[in-house]
Amino acid sequence: SLPDAPKNTSVSVSPSGEIVEGSSVTLTCSSNANPPVQNYTWFKTNGAAVWEKGSGQSFTITEISSGDSGQYYCEAQNKHGAHNSTAVSVTVAGIV
């Protein structure tokens, strides 16, 4: 295939389903790119605000708390360009 910027960038969340406060969650980014993705960057968004949270193909939040709730997405980058995934919602359930 021809050299191209990343595309079809997506995030998977493990474990899926309800996320309980104090547990850990791993987000994994996948993307089609030629040449392969060189940099993955993770962002959290909450309304208009955006925070850079980490780098690497996987991003783990340990001892998650309600403050970690929000929308997360990854940016995949190679020398031809960059592509953002769709945001995924992380919702942390409080301990009842």
Image (tube, rainbow, N blue to C red):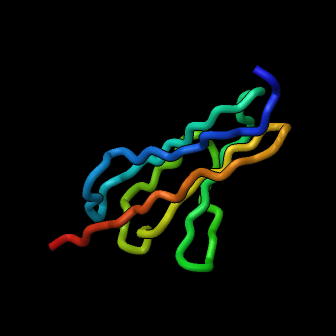
Residue most extreme to the bottom = 48
Residue 95 locus on image (x, y percent): 20, 70
Determine whether, in the image, residue 2 is placed left or right of residue 23: right
> In the rendered view of the protein, which quadrant contains the C terminus?
bottom left
Q: Which quadrant is the N terminus positioned in? A: top right
Image coordinates of residue 18 in percent, x first then y, are: 25, 58
Residue 65 in the figure: left or right of residue 84: left
Of 46 and 24, nearer the camera is 46
Of residues 82 and 90, the one nearer the viewer is 82
Residue positioned 45% across, 55% down in the render: 61
Res 33 quadrant in image: top right
| View extreme (left): residue | 96
Q: Quadrant of residue 69?
A: bottom left
In the image, residue 83 above or below residue 96: above
Left or right of 35: which side holds 42? left
Q: Is residue 71 above or below residue 37?
A: below
Residue under the point 74% across and 43% down: 77
Residue at the farthest top position: 1
Percent of width and height locating residue 80: 84, 38
Compared to residue 60, the image places residue 68 above or below, namely below
For the image, the number of numbered tags is 0
Q: Residue at x 29, y 58 (%)?
A: 19
Location of residue 90 in the rendering, given as x and y in whole percent from the top left corner: 40, 62
Q: Residue furthest front?
A: 1
